[in-house]
Image: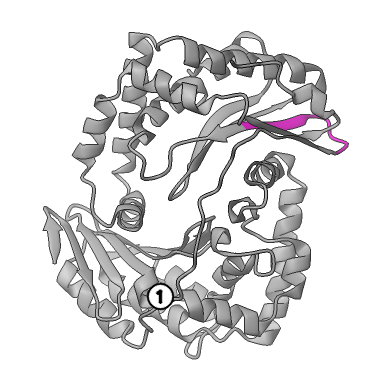
Amino acid sequence: MQSGKMYHKTILNNGIRVISEEINHVRSVSIGIWVQSGSRYENHATNGTAHFIEHMLFKGTDRRSAFDIASGIDSVGGIMNAFTGKELTSFYIKIPDYHLPLSIDLLADIFQNSRFQADEIGKEKSVVLQEISMVEDSPDDYVHDFFDAVFWNGHSLGLPVLGTKDQIINLNRDSLVSFFNDRYRGDNLVLAAAGHLKHDILVDLVSEAFQSMGQKAVEVETRKPDVSSSSVAVHKKDLEQVHMVIGTIAPSATSPKRYPGFLLNAVLGGSMSSRLFQEIREKRGLAYAIHSYLAPYMDTGILGIYAGTGEEHVRVIVDLIDDALKRLCDELLTQKEVHDAKELIKGNFLLSMESTDNRMMRLARNEICFGKHIPPEDVIRRIEAVESEDVRELACEMFNPRILSRVAVGKISEKDIASTWQKA
């Protein structure tokens, strides 16, 4: 057992890593099973499978119907949900502490005894096809999938998490079960829990409930994407507004440079007081929505800038964004900007730690990314250590016009979002 204060970790005989944080002043427990499964581990033939499996695990087991699964948690005041991303899938429950055994039993049941019935697969295809249509009808959502496909150009990180309509239509039970059996195995699972619990009791419950879980998952090779040139693309669509993303390579989830990256994003467009929000929305009124974001992965990442605006403002906004990026390369942040960005990041982080959900998610992500617990004090210390020059150096690496890519959805052409910025 590895422990530090209220943190504990146990690896079961079948490889499942059980991690917990005991928080004695709450009456809830947030518990989740995390699988290294997502669109990054798919190809064009299997794209959308991980997300579809996420849906199917709620559709019935040998012991429970779909209604039993939903009502089992609802009837005791709990919350159950799941999500699939590029690299991770998570199934999680928040429940009163005295119902911890129920949550473990239910999670073990859907992981080990889901039936993948043909009629349920057929119904769920219709649901997922509607989900894909919702994204396609929401250009502020669709533009991010479009950017990923253009930016990662042929790499699996560019595949949409939901898959495409053709791929979903062609899914069959055999391919779903094969994908599931390959990946939903003990050494590919992390079970994390945070709240009012005792680690030894948690381990006993998990060991008993998951005793029939297989140990070894199939190893899936992944290659680091190589983004060496910029791309510009427009998906023409008759819309009232233009939705665009400008993005570049950013530090990975494990890179030490992620801390300067946090400050860079906060100053650029990560808050209402950021440079882009203040300049483009507050001072000029050119857009309702303008922000930057970080999307970190295991070995790489994205910093993206999203804007939604009328087509008459596109050229001005593109130039203003380019000016903001050049300024981060050419000038140091002011002392006030550094101070305010650090306080924003620390404050958001500390407030998130008041939620057992967020604590559980942090436990799991740290285990998957680093194989260990990272104390909150270490995070605060690393944020405090960032200096203006660290941010400027990172900006110079990231904001190279040769790798900055630009996409848009709307009634414009590629030249409308192309950059005039040249860098020696």
Residue span colored magenta: 237-246
| Percent position of residue 393, x then y | 41, 21
Residue 18, by quadrant, is bottom left
- Whether 245 is drawn above or below 331: the answer is below
| Percent position of residue 219, x then y | 45, 71
Q: Is residue 245 magenta?
A: yes
- Whether 350 is drawn above or below 57: the answer is above
User: In the shown orientation, is residue 418 left or right of residue 211?
Assistant: right
Residue 247, by quadrant, is top right
Which residue is farthest bottom?
A: 62
- Whether 222 is drawn above or below 138: the answer is below
Crowdedness near tag 1: few (<14), some (14–19) or many (≥20) residues, C-alpha within 10 Å? many
Name the residue: 50% across, 81% down: 181
- State the residue position of label 1: 107
The amino acid marked with disc number 1 is: Leu
Q: Quadrant of the C terminus?
A: top right
User: In the shown orientation, is residue 318 left or right of residue 264?
Assistant: right
| Percent position of residue 405, x then y | 65, 32
- Whether 363 is drawn above or below 104: the answer is above
> Helix, strand, or loop for circle 1?
helix
Q: Is residue 310 visible?
A: no
Name the residue: 51% across, 28% down: 398
Nearer-the-camera pick, 187 or 361 = 187
Q: Is residue 193 magenta?
A: no
